[in-house]
Amino acid sequence: MNVIFRWVVIIFLTFITASLVNKGIDLWSLGTNVDGDGIGVHFFGFEINDRVKEANIHTYAIGFFVASLITLLILIALVGKKILKGNTAVS
């Protein structure tokens, strides 16, 4: 994988991870403070669900946290692979 492509993937995964954590925190802090029967959950303009009941909001928040953990692990694997592969040669 060339260097520029690797950096683009790292930046993209960092952005996605931060966005997923942010959405999870937003949903978790919302709790049961909703109008009507439920809320709609959207991520980057995509509708995940248009009617999430109050009891299920925390489940969606946990789902976003788990998705952010997965992207973080992929990010760590990419960066760790580069570190372990080695730039330790001294010229």
Image (cartoon, rainbow, N blue to C red):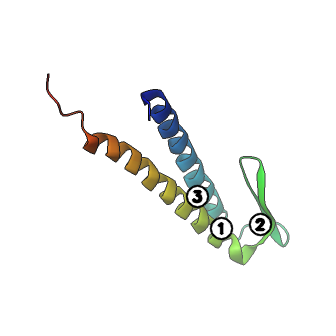
Which of pointers 2 and 1 indicates the residue nearer the eye? 1
Q: Quadrant of residue 64?
A: bottom right
Question: Alpha-carbon neighbours of circle 1 within 10 Å: few (<14), some, or many (≥20)?
Answer: some
Question: Which residue appears at 52% of the width and 44% of the height?
Answer: 13
| Mark with earlier residue (3, 2) | 3
Residue 14, image x, y percentages: 50, 43
Residue 40 as seen in the image, left or right of residue 20: right
Which residue matches tag 2?
34
Which residue matches tag 3?
25
| Mark with earlier residue (2, 1) | 2
Which residue matches tag 1?
60
- Mark 3–mark 1 distance (CA, rounded to whole Å): 11 Å
- Mark 3–mark 2 distance (CA, rounded to whole Å): 15 Å
Q: Amino acid at mark 1?
A: Tyr
Residue located farthest toward the top when viewing the structure as drawn: 91
Figure check: 21 above or below 60: above
Badge number at residue 13: none
Label 2 SS: loop
Q: Quadrant of residue 48?
A: bottom right
Question: Which sits in the foreground, 69 or 74?
Answer: 74
Residue located farthest toward the bottom when viewing the structure as drawn: 55
Contact between labelled residues 1 and 2, with CB atoms less than 8 Å apart:
no
Residue 36, image x, y percentages: 85, 70
Question: Which sits in the foreground, 62 or 73?
Answer: 73
Question: Which residue appears at 53% of the width and 56% of the height?
Answer: 68
Question: Alpha-carbon neighbours of circle 2 within 10 Å: few (<14), some, or many (≥20)?
Answer: few
Label 1 SS: helix
Residue 86 as seen in the image, left or right of residue 3: left
